[in-house]
Amino acid sequence: MTHCQIVTFFLAIFVNYFPVRNLSAAEPLTPLKTINQTTGTVSALRFSVDNQSLYLGTYGQLQVVSIESAETLHKLDKLSGYITSIAASPDGKLLAAGHYQKVTLFNTEDYSQLVQLKHHRGQVTGANFLSNQQLLTAADDGTIALWKLTDDVWSLAGSLEYDDPITSLAVDPAGKWAAIGLGDETRVTRPGAVVIIDLETFEEKKSHVIHKSAVASLATTNDGKSVLSGSFDESIIVTSVLDGIQTGIFKQHARPVNCIATVPEKEIIFSGSGGRYKEKNELIGWNLSTGEVLIKSEPHAGKITAVAVSADGKFLATGSQDESAVIFDLATFLK
């Protein structure tokens, strides 16, 4: 069998063996707070390490919002372009905001600006701390960069470059590998690829062309064995990191899959979609093991551009092109 035939075979097994169905008995996903005071599309979301705040990225601004009151505690302004990636260090003391050509680091004690890292020539589409002293970033100019803190100075420790834009970045929970999503959304017939990078050697490990169109979003499974890729082809594909086999496909979205988030310690995935049309801006919660749809809703008037889950599994947040963000009661829903 050819590689394509093998992929088709496994995808057919997944679709036929795991029938997708709505679970009407599930608890409703209750909105707790709505945040409207943004400066444009909500382009990135991240919960704080202590699960008390929501970091919200929009045009030229990074907001720190209280989960309890939905009040904006801090506004970090004068950043170039949209904030398209946010990362928090494991100890919660550092906050990284990726925007146009720069990654800005803040001290979370007083949210003072520490430094701006300059290497990328385009929009920074991904940022993840590997440790309190290491940061991984990627941009739509096709570059991925590894930064290290040595003697209180952040410097570039390594970089890779690709011909296609890097649209998304995800890191293995154990920190052994990273995945980047490639593709050009302006060329709808050009396939999208997922590249696995070995973080010990900082070299490409494997590359898989698996989507009909550009990859738009990435997430990893909790066990670090698979990567989930959402695409402009309106599908989510589950790929084994070990052998590159596509072990599942989810086709319940009717628009490009712009964002994906995994619930910690559970086989539950939340994905958000939306495109140029007003309808089908869908938030879908589904079971990774069975493909069952747990909930499908349209909480925003515009396309869903960001989704995040708190580390304690109590909260879910979505951001949208309608210039709002919503915080949901995830703990009750998961019961």
Image (tube, rainbow, N blue to C red):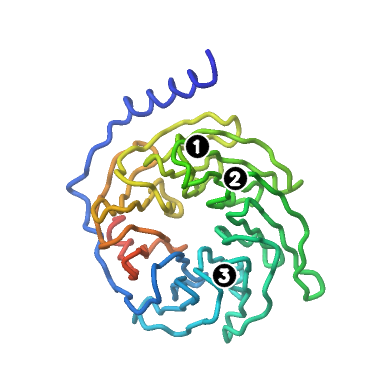
Q: Which numbered mark, 3 or 2, is in the foreground of this view?
A: 2
Considering only order in the chain, which callout, 1 or 2, is on the residue closer to the N terminus?
Answer: 2
Q: Which numbered mark, 3 or 1, is in the foreground of this view?
A: 1
- In the rendered view, would you say 101 is above or below 210? below
Q: Residue lying farthest top?
A: 1
Q: Which residue is mark 3?
A: 97
Q: Are marks 3 and 2 in contact (CB under 8 Å)?
A: no
**Residue 324 left/right relative to 216:** left
The residue under the point 61% across, 41% down is 195
Q: Secondary structure at mark 2?
A: loop
Q: Percent x, y for residue 37?
A: 35, 79
Q: Which residue is mark 2?
A: 164
Q: Residue lying farthest right?
A: 151
Q: Percent x, y for residue 122?
A: 60, 60
Rounded to the nearest whole Å, what is the CA distance between mark 2 and mark 1?
10 Å
For the C terminus, the image quarter is bottom left
**Residue 333 left/right relative to 9:** left
Callout 3 amino acid: Ala
Callout 1 amino acid: Arg
The residue under the point 56% across, 44% down is 182
Residue 332 falls in image quadrant = bottom left
- In the rendered view, would you say 183 is above or below 168? above
Q: Residue lying farthest left?
A: 24
Residue 157 falls in image quadrant = bottom right
How busy is the neighbourhood of tag 2: few (under 14 within 10 Å), some, or many (20 plus)? some
Q: Secondary structure at mark 1?
A: loop
Residue 306 falls in image quadrant = bottom left
Q: Which residue is mark 1?
A: 190
Check residue 261 in the rendering and tell me which mark sits there, or answer none: none
How busy is the neighbourhood of tag 1: few (under 14 within 10 Å), some, or many (20 plus)? some
